[in-house]
Each structure stands twice: as C-alpha cells, then as structure tokens.
Image (cartoon, grey):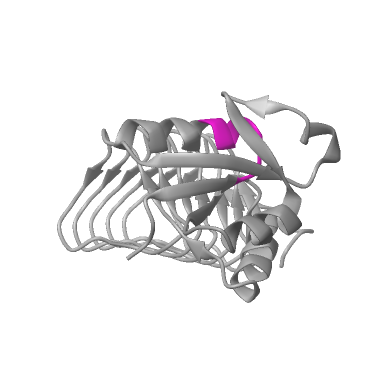
Amino acid sequence: MRSKNLVIYGASGHAKVIADIIEKRGDTLLAFVDDDRALWTEQLLGYRIWKGMDELIEQSKKGSFSVIIGIGINHTRRILSDRLEKAGIAFGTAIHPSAVIGRDVIIEEGTVIMANAVINPCTSIGNHCIINTGVTVDHDNVIGDFVHLSPGVHLGGTVQIGAMSWVGLGARVINNIIIGKNVIVGAGSTVIRNVGANWIVVGTPATYLKENPNAF
C-alpha cells in the first residue's frame, strides 16, 4: 500500500496541477521539493518547498509518504526516479477524479492522469508517465515508462508507445500503430505509420524530421 501522504518533487506549473489533483482526491500533500536554492525560502500554493534530495531523505526518516515527480521532461523524471529508488523512497500516483478509467487498466507507480482523461479497457500504462488534460487512450494500448502524452492527445486502439517518448499537444495516433522509444511527435501531428525509435516526427501525416538529439 502506498501512503496517502504525498510529496511532489518539482515546484513548477506541472507540479501545481499535480497538487490540485491530490487535493481534489482528498489525499494529503505534505510539501514540494526542488533543487533550486532560490526557491527554498518560498512557498508554493501555501506548501513548503523542501531543500532538495537531502531534506527529502531526512524527512522520509521521520514519517511515511510517497513521492510523485512533478517534472514534465521525461529524461529528468527518469534520472530523479533512479536516485529516489536508490534512496528507498516510495512512489505514488495521482489520478484526477474526473478521469475515466476502464476495466482491466494497469497504471504503474509514479504516473499522473489529469482532468478529463479517458483510459479505455485493457490498456497498460508504465511507470512515471504523464497522461495530460483531456487525453483519450483507446482500448488495448501499451504505454511504456516515462512517456508524456500532452493535453488533447488522442490514441486509437491497440497503439504501442515506447519508453521516454513524448507526444505533443493535440497530436493523434491511428489504430494499430507502434511508436518506438525516445520518439517526439510534434504538436498537432497525425501518426498513420509506425515510427522507429529515436526520431522526431511532425505533420499530417507525420513524417520524419530528424533524429532525437536527446535520446536517452
């Protein structure tokens, strides 16, 4: 069982959205955490900002809580998740009350599902994913770890998206498509063919633009 006491790693706009989800679900937000020293004397939404990883680990010795990484950049979430896991920190999830979750849906730890998202039956969503506002994911999708689906993305049925991929604002993916790992799909694009790993694709229909220079 993961604790209903939650801490958000990050103090950005994305973290604010996660805080709102936690409050609406009736869970307890203890604090934000950030590595930016300039924020350490500030508060965010009335909550303290803990002083980076050191204070987070120290606080974990005093009481039980789970952490959600509130950072939108995939590779940053991956690096932080590795550090937190090595420190023995547990991860939570945040699912907005307005999200519609179908039967036999698997949602792994660290994942955030935002307002008005729809996840249809028999879909699997990996660790530390972001399913953003108004996203629709149809039946039998497989979404890998650290994937970010931006607001308004629509995935057809039986779509696979590899780890670390980012699908931009309002993009669409038709049924039975496989998108490899470390892919970026540009905002507003329509994917009608499989996409190999480590590429950036844009347009309608989506075509290859260049290799992803930030492939992990």
The answer to whether 94 appears left or right of 97 in the picture is right
Q: Which of 45 and 110 is in front in this view?
A: 45
- The quadrant holding residue 132 is top left
Establish if 122 lies above or below 166. below
- The quadrant holding residue 84 is bottom right
Q: Quadrant of the N terminus?
A: bottom left
Q: Quadrant of the C terminus?
A: bottom right
- The quadrant holding residue 38 is top right
Q: Which residue is drawn at 72% across and 64% down?
A: 215
Q: Residue at x 37, y 33 (%)?
A: 134
Q: Which residue in the rendered view is the most extreme toward the top?
A: 45
User: Start and end of the magenta stretch?
Assistant: 9-16
Mark count:
0
> Is 15 covered by the magenta stretch?
yes
Across and down, in percent, residue 186 comes to 60, 42
Across and down, in percent, residue 30 comes to 51, 41
Q: Which residue in the rendered view is the most extreme toward the front?
A: 62
Q: Nearer the viewer, residue 45 or 13?
A: 45
Establish if 151 lies above or below 50. above
Visible residue check, residue 18: yes
Visible residue check, residue 210: no
Establish if 99 lies above or below 64. above
Across and down, in percent, residue 88 comes to 58, 73
Across and down, in percent, residue 214 comes to 76, 59
Q: Nearer the viewer, residue 206 or 101?
A: 101
Q: Which residue in the rendered view is the most extreme toward the right?
A: 38
